[in-house]
Image: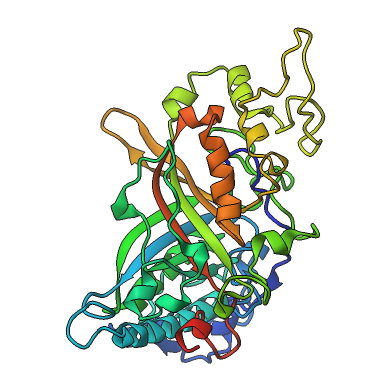
Amino acid sequence: MTLSEPRTTPETPLKEGLSRRALLGTAGATGLVLGAAGGAGVAYAAAPSEATPLTSVGSDAVSFHVKHQPGILQGLQARGHVVAFDLAAGTGAGAGAGAGTGAAGRAQAVALMRRWSQTAERLMAGEASTQGDTGVALDAGPSALTITFGFGHSFFAKTGLEKQRPVGLDPLPSFSSDRLDKTRSDGDLWVQIGANDALVAFHALRAIQKDAGSAARVRWQMNGFNRSPGATSHPMTARNLMGQMDGTRNPKPSESDFDQRIFVPESGSENPAWMANGSYAVVRRIRMLLDDWEKLTVAAQEQVVGRRKADGAALSGGSETTAMDLEKTDAKGDLVVPINAHARISRPDQNGGAAMLRRPFSFHDGIDADGTPDAGLLFICWQADPLRGFVTVQRKLDRGDALSKYIRHESSGLFAVPGGAEKGGYVGQGLLEG
């Protein structure tokens, strides 16, 4: 994993979408009542025609029906939730007499993915959900909401689709910094939610959970955040909770080999056809040992990372984007960028060209009884091949990264994320109906 190196947000334009306010303004003077299913429903009053338009933050919308699922290429979002589900017991292979084919689990998964995809499409367009909408995001626009779906290793046995399980989903190896909690790792299904408004993000999380119904239960769920849009005088690389600029060397869509590194090709790979245009997400909850980190001087922190804290520039000089000079030495003949510096070890050219697209969130889940903050990084990275991406880099870091002393990996998951759904279809349709 890399904390201080790659994680810039790719510059992908967001489409202006209809806001809830604009949608409600067309509903007529009587208002609109949605979703009696599962509750009394929520009445939405029509907005007056002279209502003030939403700000750009609220009106930004991302399309659900795209080549690659939303939530991968978009920039960092201010609020995020990641949640894993397990299909309900009593279905799938090994669930009892007559369940050996996994047909029941597969049918259940088809219905669930249809519901989830329909809900995601509506919410990302700034509309209310159809299943007893809670009204949590009333008055807000889509706020760049994205909802992304993936499948875990265990999903395939429960649905009788073992032959369709890609090699890329083979379990990750163990690493020395792992202190993994199995109850907060893995899962049959994975959902990533991001938005630039906390209520919009929570609204989506609640809708996805309600849609799961009796088909799947939550295995684990985590919350994260990033800097809010417009919080700085100009766009700049985000900082993590260690105070370091985090994302200077993230792969960019403009690079010629970007798609090759991040997305599964439509043909010519060992992946099954249903993974075309998809990607693999590695999700790790990484605890930052902030009390130990903050005891270091700024100079010592910079030696650990290999970059200046103030502006993100490499210790070898220049600006944040200046190429790092790995051979530069000081007056004593010592390397300016230490041999075990995180930024040096995690570089693609130090790992056979291995690269990942990072789109993480910071987290803070309270303070332990001894006063230690439970805080760190919800590390989420995307790659066409986890073995050549995350595993290659993490093995290198495992052998001598100076930052390893100040972090702890507490949970882990690997998920196959298929390409985007076609209009009228749902995510994973090629797998479940192929």
Q: Residue 157 at x, y = what percent? A: 34, 74
Report the front residue among 191 and 178.
178
Quadrant (top left, top right, bottom left, bottom right) of the N terminus? top right
Q: Residue 345 at x, y = what percent? A: 63, 34
Rendering quarter of residue 259: bottom right
Report the front residue among 198 and 226.
226
**The furthest residue to the left:** 97
Q: Residue 187 at x, y = what percent? A: 36, 63
**The furthest residue to the top:** 332
Q: Residue 402 at x, y = what percent? A: 55, 27
Report the front residue among 187 and 360.
187
Image vertical order of residue 373 relative to residue 113, above or below: above
Image vertical order of residue 107 relative to residue 66, above or below: below
Q: Is residue 387 visible?
A: yes
Q: Count every numbered label the image shows and give the total.
A: 0
Rendering quarter of residue 346: top right
Q: Is residue 73 visible?
A: no
Image vertical order of residue 343 relative to residue 9, above or below: above
Residue name at image x 71 percent, y 57 percent: 10
Residue name at image x 63 percent, y 41 percent: 246
Residue name at image x 66 percent, y 28 percent: 306
Q: How is the image coloured?
A: rainbow
On screen, residue 41 versus residue 47, left or right, reads: left
Image vertical order of residue 182 relative to residue 369, above or below: below
Report the front residue among 308 and 358.
358
